[in-house]
């Protein structure tokens, strides 16, 4: 992985984008049967050649360990036979999902007899930039193939060899199904300049999806001329309203924090109506304590649970991704929504309430990508919401807001069927 | 209209964006009745105070004439009582359109009992940058108000006084209906630096729509961190297939070019199957000639119509917006579609054919924002396609492709109604 000089970066980006554009043209009109065949071959190959994948992964792990990488980071990079089988299963699930391309929606007859509808078409070339986990390579590749898009995948340098083999297998599977190999490509260098060139080739690249840290997303947003869909952090809230069911509120607040704290739809801040707090806090916080959750509370919370550490202003906008929860008591629903508006990240916010009017106001006024009543924030997920698989969760409103499934990887063109109509 | 120093430009942009953000929050939850009331008051005021508008317009016209502006440019800037009445009518039509905000789509019950649907919400703050015609100010403002978005309008400097009065009236109408004045704002300076600052304030501005010349669109695309929806040029095609109905083909090819040549959905290039050309060209080109249309043809066209000027490579990608047509003979449908893929702008393309398979291939394989069979390209228009009014025609696939109506000015958030569900 050498860093090529700048001119080479430009040439490499031009070559990748040009090849992707050409392949996207062919993939856009491929039949569902052919695309599914490529994915099925891929799934079989992932399982049949697991050893080849694990050997490449071993090289990445060795290099990472030599670089001093340990713990969760090393674990995210590590593949096992079971994890590879999980990837193959994921690909087979994508085969089972309906192909959105070609679907015609809302065809109506206009007064002049024209039939007008909208047909779903692929977006085209999608540049996906992500970090360590190699399963993203296969997940994103499979969703793009199924929806007729040609991805250019730029994974983390620490997964270089693993991603290389996975992309090789995708290309082999495409060719075996009679589709162009370049419908999936990898950026085979860790040189950031290639990425910078790619995200400025708006004549060939239709979308860039940066998945990773805020620094990466900010860099892409600042430098891209290609449209960007951001997958920013989730500072997710649960608000427990005055007359909420106590047991339900405790279960949801516990599940949203503890069931999988390291993901973006986990709750980070718990807002509690002051009137219900004395009854909710003792039992819930005891459960938190038993589960190893650290509570950081405002003054009113700490007066009820002195064990809590004091929350600072920074806590309200922090995505812990850990067993930490910030807790604030609020005077009413309006104060809760004001807190969410001020500190939230537009990702996922839930209310627990038995009050009809409170539920309606929360739904109407909270503008996040997913708004829940009496359910855990953990449900903001493509599979749980019924999209099948997802390529990530968009926190920007344009094009897709919330989980992006196959349909969100398409555009719609107008189709007009006439019988000689002209305008007068 | 002085050019403020750079720090002032930043401060002005911050002030505009901050005020728009706050107003958008209030407008997002305004009732349809209140929004419609503001628009009705505006329509009445446009008609009742036409003299005030025409006086401001006279100042702009005077300044433009002093600057040597003449002809079509001056005409586009000029308002008359009839044109102001037309603006008021346009606003009243927007009142009659359904409000997309709050509509809940596709609510289904998941296996665990969760009800999941998507609710339409406004995008938020939209920066619209456009050139001379002052009616865009009112059209865009009315569509944004109806869909709950707060626009920041940046019109051409030549319409400065006219736009100033029109925005003033919109703000008065908003206040009269109990809505915030800052839900519509104008950039009251011709300083480009203010625009440049605005399109980088992605924490407050949700979308920028540049409507104007390629230079403007390119500048915005290069410099914005806010998402951009491009309204690029229309290099639109009509392809007359082998077995087309001759009279229908001639009518469509004539209408697409001549009915209103100065707009983006007018045909610029006519592609003719070589076998039908000898029968189509004599009558059609005689009509063109009578209508003052200049034909620029390839060699085969000129062999059939020696009157035609030779077309150069540049002609195939030129948007004439004038009574000029480029004509090429092609060997088959595949060659026609290859020409469209290579030279088209993804705007509007039509086929005239009686061949079922040709119609299906054209629909499936041409990826433009509007694909027509046996109808004039001039139908790619929000009103003609049934969207009601439109804010422009997007040529980028993300979010909206083709005419953008009220619905395209909204996003969708997920709404989840539970009864205590948690993830296991």
Image (spheres, coloured by chain):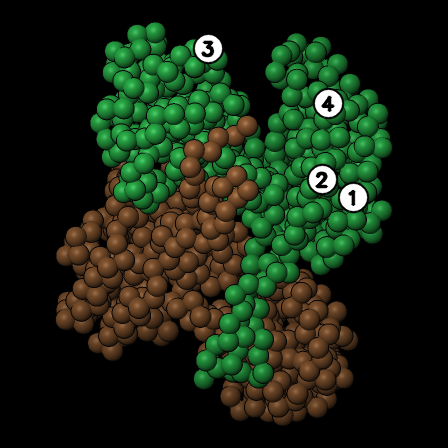
Chain colours: A green, B brown
Kindly identify which numbered label has been placed on residue A290. Answer: 3
Q: Are marks 3 and 1 on the same chain?
A: yes
Q: Residue drawn at (53%, 83%), measured in percent from left and top?
A: A421
Left or right of residue B398, residue A313 in this image = left
- Front one among A256 and A224: A256
The number of discs equals 4
Q: Are marks 2 and 4 on the same chain?
A: yes
Left or right of residue B192, residue B327 in this image = right
Q: Find residue B68 and report its image quarter.
A: bottom left
Left or right of residue A125, residue A393 in this image = left
Q: Find residue B335 and report its image quarter.
A: bottom right
- Residue A363 screen position, x and y as percent: 35, 43
Q: Residue drawn at (30%, 7%), measured in percent from left and top?
A: A306
Q: Are marks 3 and 2 on the same chain?
A: yes
Q: Would residue B183 be visible to someone looking at this image?
A: yes
Kindly identify which numbered label has been placed on residue A91. Answer: 2
Q: Are marks 2 and 1 in contact (CB under 8 Å)?
A: yes
Real-space Cα distance between discs 1 and 4?
21 Å
For disc 1, the marked residue is A40
Sequence-first disc among 2 and 1:
1
Real-space Cα distance between discs 3 and 1?
45 Å
Real-space Cα distance between discs 4 and 3?
32 Å
In which quadrant is the N terminus of chain A drawn?
Answer: top right
Tell me the element at label 1.
helix
In which quadrant is the C terminus of chain A drawn?
Answer: bottom left
Q: Chain of mark 2?
A: A
- Residue A378 screen position, x and y as percent: 49, 31
Q: Would residue A190 be visible to someone looking at this image?
A: no
Tell me the element at label 2.
helix
Real-space Cα distance between discs 2 and 4?
16 Å
Sequence-first disc among 4 and 3:
4
Q: Are marks 3 and 1 in contact (CB under 8 Å)?
A: no
């Amino acid at each position: 992985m050498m860093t090529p000089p700048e001119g080479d970066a430009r040439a490499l980006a031009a070559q990748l984008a040009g090849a992707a554009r050409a392949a996207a043209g062919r993939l856009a009109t491929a039949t569902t049967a052919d695309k599914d065949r490529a994915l099925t071959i891929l799934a079989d190959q992932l399982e049949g050649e697991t050893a080849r994948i694990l050997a490449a992964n071993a090289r990445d792990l060795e290099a990472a360990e030599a670089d001093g990488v340990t713990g969760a980071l090393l674990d995210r990079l590590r593949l096992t036979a079971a994890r590879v089988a999980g990837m193959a299963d994921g690909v087979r699930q994508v085969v089972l999902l309906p192909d959105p391309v070609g679907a015609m929606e809302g065809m109506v007859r206009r007064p002049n007899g024209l039939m007008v509808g909208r047909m779903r078409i692929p977006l085209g070339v999608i540049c996906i930039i992500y970090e360590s986990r190699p399963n993203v390579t296969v997940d994103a590749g499979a969703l793009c193939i199924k929806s007729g898009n040609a991805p250019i995948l730029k994974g983390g340098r620490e997964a270089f060899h693993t991603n290389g083999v996975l992309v090789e297998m995708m290309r082999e599977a495409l060719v075996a199904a009679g589709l162009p190999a370049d419908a999936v490509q990898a950026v085979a260098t860790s040189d950031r300049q290639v990425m910078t060139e790619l995200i400025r080739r708006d004549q060939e690249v239709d979308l860039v999806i940066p998945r990773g840290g805020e620094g990466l997303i900010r860099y892409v947003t600042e430098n891209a001329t290609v449209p960007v869909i951001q997958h920013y952090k989730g500072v997710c809230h649960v608000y427990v309203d005055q007359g909420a069911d106590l047991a339900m509120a405790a279960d949801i607040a516990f599940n949203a924090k503890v069931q999988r704290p390291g993901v973006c739809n986990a709750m980070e801040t718990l807002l509690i109506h002051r009137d219900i707090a004395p009854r909710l806090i003792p039992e819930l916080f005891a459960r938190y304590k038993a589960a190893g959750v650290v509570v950081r509370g405002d003054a009113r919370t700490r007066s009820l649970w002195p064990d809590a550490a004091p929350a600072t202003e920074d806590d309200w906008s922090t995505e812990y991704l850990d067993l930490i929860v910030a807790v604030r008591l609020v005077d009413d629903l309006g104060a809760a929504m004001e807190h969410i508006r001020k500190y939230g990240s537009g990702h996922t916010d839930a209310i627990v309430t038995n009050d009809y009017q409170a539920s309606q106001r929360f739904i109407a006024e909270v503008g996040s990508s997913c708004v829940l009543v009496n359910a855990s924030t953990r449900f903001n997920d493509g599979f749980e919401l019924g999209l099948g698989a997802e390529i990530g969760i968009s926190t920007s409103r344009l094009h897709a807001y919330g989980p992006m499934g196959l349909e969100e990887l398409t555009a719609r063109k107008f189709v007009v069927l006439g019988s000689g109509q002209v305008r007068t």
